[in-house]
Image (cartoon, helix red, strand yellow):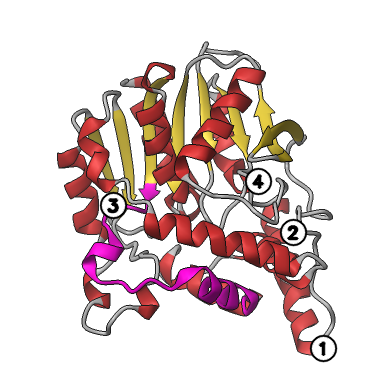
Amino acid sequence: MSARRLSAILLLSALGAARATGAAEPSYGPELEGFDYPYPVQQYRFASQGAQLHMAYIDVRPAKPNGRTVVLLHGKNFCAATWKGSIDALAQAGYRVVAPDQVGFCKSSKPEHYQYSFQQLAANTHALLESIGVKTATVMGHSTGGMLAVRYGLLYPQQTEQLVLANPIGLEDWKALGVPSLGVDKWFERELQQSADKIRNYETSTYYVNQWKPEYEPWVQMLAGMNRGPGKRIVAWNSALLYDMIYTQPVVYEFPLLTMPVLLLVGTKDTTAIGKDAAPAELRPKLGNYAELGKRAARAIPKATLVEFDDMGHAPQMQDPQRFHAALLKGLAAK
């Protein structure tokens, strides 16, 4: 048994024992204080909407650079750290890799008041890249990061040499389909009730097709730990604002406007749809059908290449890293 797998099993056993005995599980600060990332974390400091903010980011330079940079945009329930497997694979292949935590997430600022928009997050990311000398890049987004990557490509087409969308959400307009608006206050109430068990159960069914592995557990504790910590309310409030952004700012109608090559990497067992559990019962089975949504997106995007993984869910880069990264590197080389 590998040391990595043994370590993961021991962590899971320890967490199980902690739950069984009522002992405290990990508790982290509102900017994930206490949770270590696999690479050094730097900070980009800037002013936005009248506030002084910072974005945490990872910047990994390869031993043998190929001259290209890949920017990794995380999803709603993810952080820069969860890209570790992709960072390793890309850096080994010669890519410089930049992985930021967006404002409102993980180790970045959690402002008390912020008008979240994909335009704003894209502008923040663009300013960060300019500050570290990245002029052009391949932009890769997963989940909510896929919606952000699309917006980035629309705003900065000359600086975006390629888009990669890994199980992006926003391939359909939930509001137009009949998913009711929850509003920020209701999202806030829901986020305050988050727990490790709720996160784990959701991710098991949606991300990993009911196939749980011990190595997923640290990412559950990463999220749940902030909800246990002293900044629980500000974390939940920013999360609520972000959910409202996702629901109210569809990008699906603008797919035909993308001018750069787009690589779509889609686990077809995914069923993710924002607000799905609040939708009418008869509507729920029709939402988040990625076996169809990926194909529909590929037809709408002028220069799209679709790669499907028929046995994977919402996080194929974590469910089967070897197969996912082989397809990713092939798609990057074919640009």
For residue 177: magenta? yes
Is disc 3 placed on a helix, strand or loop?
loop
Instruction: Judge depth for marks 3 and 2 and give the one in front.
Output: 3
Residue 290: x and y in percent read: 27, 58
- 304 or 227: nearer the viewer: 227
Callout 1 amino acid: Thr
N-term-proximal mark, 1 vs 4: 1
Residue 138 got which mark?
none
Instruction: Judge depth for marks 1 and 4 and give the one in front.
Output: 4
Q: Is residue 263 above or below residue 26?
A: above
Residue 171 got which mark?
3
Task: Tell me the quadrant of the picture where the N terminus can be found.
Answer: bottom right
Residue at 35%, 65% in the rendered image: 273
Residue at 27%, 76% in the rendered image: 284
Q: Disc 3 versus disc 2: distance between alpha carbons?
A: 37 Å
- 76 or 18: nearer the viewer: 76
N-term-proximal mark, 4 vs 3: 4
Is disc 4 placed on a helix, strand or loop?
helix
Instruction: Farthest residue to the front: give it.
Output: 50
N-term-proximal mark, 3 vs 2: 2
Instruction: Judge depth for marks 1 and 2 and give the one in front.
Output: 1
Residue carrying label 1: 21
Callout 3 amino acid: Leu
Q: Disc 1 versus disc 4: distance between alpha carbons?
A: 29 Å
Instruction: Judge depth for marks 2 and 4 and give the one in front.
Output: 4
Residue 126: x and y in percent read: 54, 26
Q: Disc 4 versus disc 3: distance between alpha carbons?
A: 25 Å
Q: Is residue 153 above or below residue 26?
A: above
Instruction: Judge depth for marks 4 and 3 and give the one in front.
Output: 3
